[in-house]
Amino acid sequence: MKAVIWHNPRCSKSREGLALLRATPGVEVEIFDYLGHPPSRERLAAVYARAGLTPRAGLRTAEDAAKPLRDASDDAILDAMVANPILIERPLVETDKGVRLGRPPEKIREIL
């Protein structure tokens, strides 16, 4: 099984999610550097749709750049995430079985 992780190596939860994937037999891990290569708006929206998440639920609210988005629409949040990908909560993990936001990292097991 292939698993794509939207990974930020500076994030402890992202590192934990990656370790979980690597420790799971039969999982081929692909790391998506979403900070260095931001996703398109279409890809980001599709990933959230597959995860059953709204863009607001995927917003990293701990970032200062998220504060102006407090009352923003989902469309405005998506635009902000594409322009400033640090706003994307991580880790997101995609497999053929679905997409999960790995908070906590154990949620990733649901799609393995």
Image (spheres, rainbow, N blue to C red):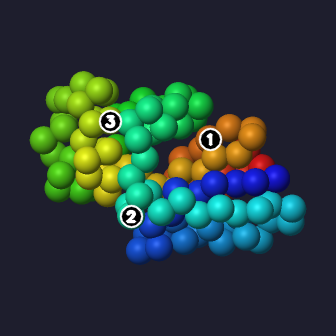
Q: Measuring 29% from the left and 27% from the top, which residue is drawn there? A: 75
Mark 2 residue type: Gly
Q: Earlier in the sequence, mark 3 or mark 2?
A: 2
Q: Earlier in the sequence, mark 3 or mark 1?
A: 3
Q: Measuring 39% from the left and 52% from the top, which residue is drawn there? A: 38
Which residue does the numbered mark 2 point to in the structure image?
A: 36
Q: Which mark is residue 28?
A: none
Q: Earlier in the sequence, mark 2 or mark 1?
A: 2
From mark 3 to mark 1, how far is it between C-alphas?
Answer: 17 Å
Q: Measuring 19% from the left and 36% from the top, which residue is drawn there? A: 70
Q: Which mark is residue 78?
A: 3
In front: mark 3 or mark 2? Answer: 2
Mark 2, Cα crowd under 10 Å, few <14 / some 14-19 / many 20+, is few
Residue farthest right in this picture: 26
Q: Which mark is residue 99?
A: 1
- Asked if 92 appears above or below 68 in the picture, the reply is below
Is there any visible trace of residue 107 in the rendered image?
no
From mark 2 to mark 1, how far is it between C-alphas?
Answer: 21 Å
Residue 106 occupies quadrant = bottom right
Q: Residue 78: x and y, percent? A: 32, 35
Is there any visible trace of residue 4 in the rendered image?
yes
In front: mark 3 or mark 1? Answer: 3
**Callouts 3 and 1 close, C-beta under 8 Å:** no
Mark 3, Cα crowd under 10 Å, few <14 / some 14-19 / many 20+, is many
Which type of secondary structure does the marked residue at label 3 adopt? helix
